[in-house]
Amino acid sequence: MEGKQKPQVNVSFSYNTLEETLEYTPQKKSIFIGIPKENSFQENRIALTPQAVTILINNGNRVVIESQAGIASSFTDNEYSEAGAQIAYDKKEVFNADLILKTAPISEEESELLKKDQIIFSPIHIPSLSKKQLEIFLEKKIIAIALGQIKDDAGNFPIVRSMSQIAGVHSVQIASKYLSNVQGGKGILMGGIAGVPPANVVIIGAGMVGEYAVRTALGCGAQVKVFDNSIYRLMRLQRTVGQTVFTSVIDPLILSKALEEADIAIGALKPQKGLAPLVVTESMVQRMKSGSVIIDVSIDNGGCFETSELTTHENPVFVKHDVIHYCVPNIASAVSNTASQAISNILMPLILSFSDSVGGSDSIINNKPGLISATYIYKGKLTSKVLSKKFNMKFIDLNLILSSNL
């Protein structure tokens, strides 16, 4: 038998070990978030709920909240503390954060506390904004983002949408309350009962506020008439509500007759160039039934009833021509717990996405195109055409700034 052939090893070969390949996960950035207590604009909402704070902190972020900031929304300091937030008793401590979240516009007192390169999310109230305050923002070189102008991936304004839905629903609830004898109304039940007709409701505006007011009024059993100058919005409302509703363009004669028969009139017209169209004259209001109710949701933008005057949550109504007027701006703040949860549901995922961004504030905004149109001040430059025209100040397109930084 032939012997087995032994394997041959060529010593000229060299055998080198391979390095083990490990998956590398980039470390998330930690963001220092500050939430001050709101003391202006009748604001009761807060930008983040305790549940949202828990998620942000579990993802490596840091949150500091001014004491009692959530109390008006029924969120206690203890709940935020248990969520992992630091409770601050000095507003200055909150404004040491890199990212400030506010549900009311920046006040003059807060303007002095801003620091360089800080990112501020807050509403912008153009009528109350002064040139002096704007100059402070520019001098501090902050990045100021208007909360209501933030867009989602579909190009919608999610915070405005949510607050409009709340305003639409709550406006009908408020009107129903003031129809009662206890509140000085005619003592009418919104939906009526068998053999007794329901309330007549006129809704002026077929946008998001109007749509949800219609849904709520119909759900209560009321008879509803809707007016708007946009045929498209009226058609969309008919389609989304899912039932036939009286609709009309805003013809003064038809509108006046409808108001004469109305128990409730809700104004919810969208602003045009910053102001709501004034479509209901004082003479129309004079012909309305005694004890009827006007809810002017458009009062935030001047109102669409000639008789409207600003009121507050503490003193919400006045009577003129025997008609009850409710003209409180920021209606959503009256149901602050619901409104805060809606805002928090939008901001929390947005902030989490910031943690995944590589780089500084430039990359945060570049990675979120929906923030570009909402940014009205960027590191000492005014990037809002509206504010530029109002205050006669130099405007720079933010897209040009960001592209030059690439």
Image (cartoon, helix red, strand yellow):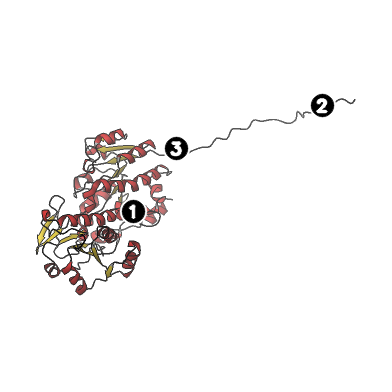
Q: Residues within 10 Å of mark 3 (few under 14, many from 20)?
A: few
The amino acid at mark 3 is: Gln
Dots 3 and 1: beta carbons under 8 Å?
Answer: no
Q: Residue furthest right?
A: 1
Nearer the camera: disc 3 or disc 2: 2
Measured as percent of width and height from the top left, residue 31 is found at 36, 40
User: For numbered disc 3, what is the local secondary structure?
Assistant: loop
Q: Which residue is mark 3?
A: 27
Identify which residue is drawn at 26% across, 57% down: 168
Mark 2 or mark 1, whichever is nearer to me: 1
Report helix, strand or loop for mark 1. helix
Q: Tell which residue pokes out farthest to the front in this image.
A: 195
Locate residue 143, reporting x and y percent: 32, 48
In the picture, the disc for residue 158 is 1
The 10 Å Cα crowd at callout 1, few under 14, some 14 to 19, many 20 or more, is many
Pointer 2 or 1: first along the chain: 2
Q: Is residue 393 visible?
A: no
Image quadrant where one finds the N terminus: top right
Specify the amino acid type for callout 2.
Lys
**Place of residue 362 in the rendered image (x, y in percent of width and height, measured from the top left):** 39, 48
Q: Position of residue 399 (x, y in %)?
A: 39, 56
| Front one among 400 and 328 | 328
- Residue 6's label in the rendered image is 2
**CA separation in Å, label 3 and label 2:** 54 Å
Q: How many marks?
A: 3
Compared to residue 377, the image places residue 1 above or below, namely above
Please tell me which of labels 3 and 2 falls first in the chain.
Answer: 2
